[in-house]
Image (cartoon, grey):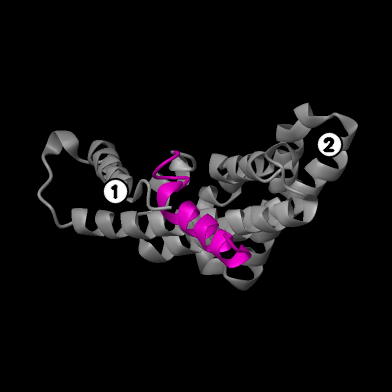
Amino acid sequence: MNVIQVIVTIILAGILTDNYVLSQFLGICPFLGVSKKLNTAMGMSAAVIFVMMLATAVTYPIYRLILESLGLEYLQTIVFILIIAALVQLVEIILKKFMPPLHKSLGVYLPLITTNCAVLGCTILVTEDYGSAAGYGFGSGYLYAIICAFGSGMGFLVAMAIFAGVRKRMESCDIPETLQGLPITLIAASLVAMSFLGFSGVV
């Protein structure tokens, strides 16, 4: 495959077959907590895409050039969380200054991006999938890692948009009292996740 085909494959895999939320079940907390309204879901997804790409752009070279060369790979998780936390603070400051309504609607879920396992999982997995152990040079590995972060973020956005639509439809449904609230939300989420199994083998 040429470079363009590889890039398209990585992005489609992040959105469809390897969707972090619906296939790998990472980032479930914001997925369930912020998907009640479409505009809030989109705002959260945009913030996650930005943080995923920026975090990957920063953590990948730190891992390859510093941690790996010094034999400090075991510090990966701690270092990555610190970097992600700093980036989330940056996003929060920007939203609070330029988009106060979105900042208010995201509420506690915005700082929680720091501990969003989808973001941390993305930064860790790209170093494994496109690192030296996988046979990638630094240049090509770095490019594919950032593209993978973008595709994973888009997958998060697609999952949030679909589930926000599902929850909107659920508001007008006659749900049995015993299933109202969290139970029907989890059932709906599992059905949406199952629907993505249809993409298995496509990419």
Q: Nearer the viewer, mark 1 or mark 2?
A: 1
Neighbour class for label 1 at 10 Å: few (<14), some, many (≥20)? few
Q: Is residue 66 left or right of residue 103?
A: right
- Mark carried by residue 198: 1
Does the magenta stretch mainly form a helix, a strand or a loop? helix
Circle count: 2
Disc 1 marks which amino acid? Gly
Which amino acid is tagged 2? Leu
| First-in-chain label (1 vs 2) | 2
Horizontally, residue 32 falls left or right of residue 134, namely: left
Q: Nearer the viewer, residue 45 or 104?
A: 45
Residue range highlighted in magenta: 1-24
Q: Residue at x 79, y 41 (%)?
A: 63
Point out residue 128 in the picture as x, y percentages from the top left corner: 66, 38
Question: Rounded to the nearest whole Å, what is the CA distance between mark 1 and mark 2?
Answer: 39 Å
Q: Can residue 30 be seen in the rendering of this structure?
A: yes
> In which quadrant will I find the N terminus?
bottom right
Disc 2 element: helix
Q: Is residue 89 visible?
A: no
Q: Position of residue 34 (x, y in %)?
A: 42, 52
> Residue 165: x percent and y percent?
28, 60
Q: Secondary structure at mark 1?
A: helix
What number is the disc on residue 67?
2
Q: Check whether the beta carbons of the residues at disc 1 and disc 2 lie within 8 A of each other.
A: no
Q: Residues within 10 Å of mark 2 (few under 14, many from 20)?
A: some
Question: Is 77 above or below relative to 7?
Answer: above
